[in-house]
Amino acid sequence: MGLLSKIQDAFNRDKAPGKAASALEVDVHSHMLPGIDDGAKTLDDTLDMIERTSRFGIRKIITTPHIMYEFYRNTPDIIRQKLEFVQEAVKERGMDVELEAAAEYYLDDAFIQMVKNKEPLLTFGDNYVLIETNYIQSHPELLQVFFDLRIQGYKPVFAHPERYAYLLRNRAKETLEAYQRIYDSGALFQLNLMSFAGYYGPQIKNTAELLLKEGMIHMVGSDAHKVEHVRLINAMKQTKLFERITAADLLNNTL
Ligand SMILES: [Fe+2]
């Protein structure tokens, strides 16, 4: 990060509400609604994931089903109905966790059209919209879409930037420059706890740690699709790395 961005960043962050430095209370990215994407399959899976997540110390789960034209044509109505169904089950079981839903929008033609048509998008927190892209190929309209969303008053959140092969270069310095271009567009960076845990391999773990070290991280999410993912994240809780992650000035606990 350049010196000027660092100063601007520190200034902006100073105004953010305070939070406990050692805990993570809100998960902003997961696939816990049953049967509507590649996440939880049944209500039992869902409740198991929620229960284990809350045991980790999370008080609010903002779950984010995929909206991806080719595979998961979810709509706000589908997501809201599923959310209400799960909220009811959570209440019946007396589980002490708040459940909200937004979406993880995949950057495809359908999403670009949605933005052009100014269709209302599913958001969380302070008008945040979670967006992912293809892992291998960069999308020529990424920065334009972030710009258009900001014009419309949304705050784009780039889902798991550490996972995109198209941003990696041979040298760390060049990789950072590729990230810096996106960071400077004003999109917020949401990193995956599973990346830090090494779930997607050493290269993605290293990239996540590089972004953390450079302060290019605004929030973290589990991106849990199944119970095993929650277990893996829970196992991280006592690690030094988790301490470093939560010591970063994350927006999670303000949500
Ligand atoms: Fe996801």
Image (cartoon, rainbow, N blue to C red):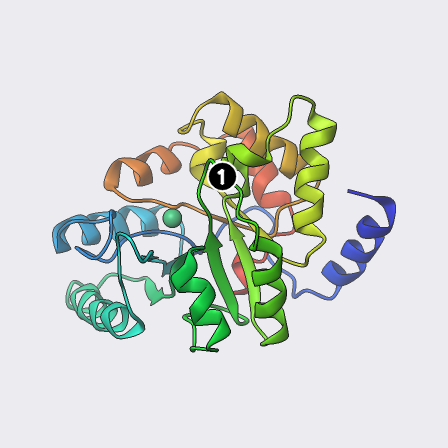
- Work out whether residue 50 can be spotted: yes
Quarter of the figure with the N terminus: top right
Q: Nearer the viewer, residue 136 or 207?
A: 136
Residue drawn at 33 percent across, 44 percent down: 224
Q: Position of residue 105 (x, y in %)?
A: 41, 58
Q: Position of residue 186 (x, y in %)?
A: 67, 59
Residue drawn at 41 percent across, 70 percent down: 122
Q: In the picture, residue 74 is in which quadrant?
A: bottom left
Q: Nearer the viewer, residue 17 or 216?
A: 216
- Vertical arrangement, residue 90 with respect to residue 47, above or below: below
Q: Position of residue 117 (x, y in %)?
A: 46, 77
Q: In the picture, residue 157 is in which quadrant?
A: bottom right
Q: Is residue 250 left or right of residue 33?
A: right
Q: Is residue 205 left or right of residue 75?
A: right
Label 1 beta carbon less than 8 Å to ligand 1: no
Number of residue marks: 1
Q: Is residue 74 left or right of residue 180?
A: left
Residue drawn at 57 percent across, 50 percent down: 140
- Vertical arrangement, residue 251 with respect to residue 120, above or below: above
Q: Secondary structure at mark 1?
A: loop
At label 1, counting other C-alpha atoms closer than 10 Å, the crowd grade (few under 14, some 14-19, many 20 or more) is few
- The residue that label 1 is drawn on is 137
Q: Nearer the viewer, residue 81 or 227?
A: 81
Name the amino acid type tagged 1. Answer: Gln
- Work out whether residue 123 can be spotted: no
